[in-house]
Image (tube, helix red, strand yellow):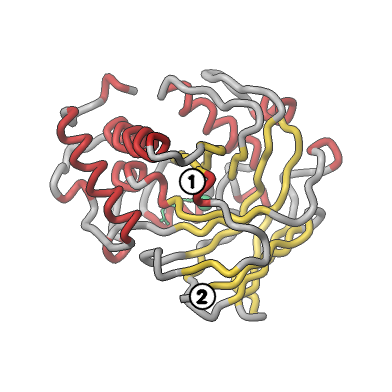
Amino acid sequence: MSSNLTLSREDIVRLCERVEGAQTRAYAIPKLTDEYPDMTIADGYAVQSELRRRFIAKGHKLVGWKAGLTSKAKMQQMGVSVPSIGFLTDRMARPENSAITTSDLVHPRVECEVAFVMKETLQGPGCTAADVLAATDYVLPAVEIIDSRFSGFKFDLASVIADNGSSARFVGGGRPRYVEDLDLRTLGVVMEKNGELVGMAASAAVLGHPAEAVAMLVNILAELGENLPAGSFVMSGGITEAVPVKPGDSVVARFQELGSVSMRFTE
Ligand code: 0L1
Ligand code: MG
């Protein structure tokens, strides 16, 4: 992927500082391609890798990865044509049933996802959904709170990737299950906000099968010179559309076979 880099090391560091400021102080910035229209996906990942390096240097722990933009509906909604990945740290994790503050977020939205916990390390390229299922310890239901830092949700794939795939917070919960006991393609998911139905879909929305999304993630990691270590927590991508949340909202995601995940939002 590095062969498609157009940004200099100085530009990568400058853009990383811009994204880091927006993420840590919760303000919106223009999409990065306004200034660098030729930015490539490889440039986006170079900025994201620098962001990861900085967070880890500050003591954040890498706990896993997320696949993003993995459903056709989501790609259309966002005007992009390929999925993306982003990293997850311990600072982004929130307990089930907790109050999640929004004053440290720009414009948070929630989506239901199947999360995988890995028992074996996976290395691409060539990783398949079958490899993922064999390397999975268990799956559990999760909600991702995404928070694009770009003004008015105006962005493109390179900018979203640099912004770590809009990663902000995540909540895992429900009932952990072994993959051999489930048909992960056909799980129904319902999302309620303040007691009203706001989303309904089946897990096949994610590239036909959530394990396909994790295989895609492992193969992108290989292009970045990384693997997916045993013990990783992996979000496989939004099954339902992303729904905006504000202080006072409560959200329940109900997954067939996997139980539910709840949270509320405060100032
Ligand atoms: O998790 C994802 O699908 C990434 C979404 C990136 C774009 C957005 O902020 O909606
Ligand atoms: Mg997501």
Instruction: Specify the label residue 266 is tagged with.
Output: 2
* Residue receiving disc 1: 68
Amino acid at circle 2: Thr
Distance from mark 2 CB to nearest ligand 1 atom below 8 Å: no
Given the current orientation, which residue lies at the most extreme front position?
Answer: 59
- Residue shown at the point (68%, 55%) measured from the top left: 202
Mark 2, residues whose alpha carbon is within 10 Å: few (<14), some, or many (≥20)?
Answer: some
Question: Left or right: where does residue 22 sit relative to residue 187?
Answer: left
Question: Left or right: where does residue 157 sit relative to residue 195?
Answer: left
Q: Which of 163 and 256 is in front in this view?
A: 163
Tell me where residue 223 sits by quadrant: top left
Residue 71 pos. (x, y %): 53, 49
Q: In this view, does 168 lie above or below 66?
A: below
Residue 235 pos. (x, y %): 59, 45
Residue 170 seen: yes
Residue 262 pos. (x, y %): 67, 66
Distance from mark 1 CB to nearest ligand 1 atom below 8 Å: yes
Amino acid at circle 1: Gly
Q: Nearer the viewer, residue 231 or 132?
A: 231
Instruction: Specify the label residue 254 is tagged with.
Output: none
